[in-house]
Amino acid sequence: MICFILQGSKRVSINDNLLSYDSEHYLVSALDLPLIGQILDAEGGQPYVAVSLVLDPAILAELAATMPPVRESEQKGIGVMINPMTASLRDTLLRLLSLLDTPADIPVLGPMVERELLYRLLLGPQGRLLRQIAQPNGALGSIRRAVAWIRDNYNTRLRIEALCEASGMSRASLHRHFLSMTGFSPIQYQKQLRLQEARQLLLAGEHRASDVAFVVGYESASQFSREYLRQFGAPPARDVREIRQAIGTPTSA
């Protein structure tokens, strides 16, 4: 997907990478990554406002096929990128959003303006990444299938053979491309999912940390506590208590 911030700003942490963007930038995400984000209000206490658009690979492929061939150099980096907003892209986005004021125009004009928006994105610095999204049989498509498999099976033992089968890649190719595009090894990716899901479960109810550990796939509660502390900087109970206090949610006695 692509995310545009209209007001305020946001920080996103992916492994050791910290990305920041605001209304002068936009974010392109080619993969479903385990992110940790912090939303910041705009100046004067105005609320954060953003809009996101799920990228349609079929439309991207159709548009890319009509554009002149582009000779692109090898681009390295994870599948999430921050780019500066341009005047033409902002104009197209505003025209797309203005259709909300005239709902009757959306069926006709909406697809046209969306195609223009995607066209301008293809012309931008992440055109190569968007072209990869449009190619389901490329390396990015294979890693997206691997990511989907891990997300569907995050609380079970990771089987590399099954992951290779899901992605259609050899073991060596899978590890190389997975690390390059996500910033994690498959096992590290699964660990991130487990810890983030555990945090959500702890925040959502009165579950004990030991119970949550087994729900998300850990076989040892002590290992879960150690990895939770390493990831979030505090043991599970203290971390949840501090979050609830920060957002004004009552804590249990």
Image (cartoon, rainbow, N blue to C red):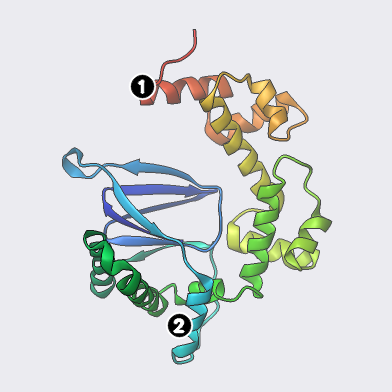
Q: Residue at x 24, y 68 (%)?
A: 95
Q: Residue at x 59, y 33 (%)?
A: 230
> In the rendered structure, which amino acid carries the disc numbered 2?
Leu
Residue at mark 1: 248
Q: Is residue 172 left or right of residue 6?
A: right
Choose top left, top right, bottom left or bottom right for residue 45.
top left
Choose top left, top right, bottom left or bottom right for residue 102.
bottom left
Residue most extreme to the right: 161
For label 2, the crowd category at 10 Å Cα-Cα, with few meaning under 14, some 14 to 19 and many 20 or more, is: some
Whether residue 235 is visible, yes or no, is: no
Residue 193's x, y, as percent?
62, 43
Residue most extreme to the top: 253
Q: Secondary structure at mark 1?
A: loop
Name above or below for residue 88 compared with residue 209: below
> In the rendered structure, which amino acid carries the disc numbered 1?
Gly
Q: Is residue 94 left or right of residue 134?
A: left
Residue 174's x, y, as percent?
73, 64
Q: Is residue 185 left or right of residue 248?
A: right
Residue 81's x, y, as percent?
45, 62
Mark nearer the N terminus (2 vs 1): 2
Residue at mark 2: 63
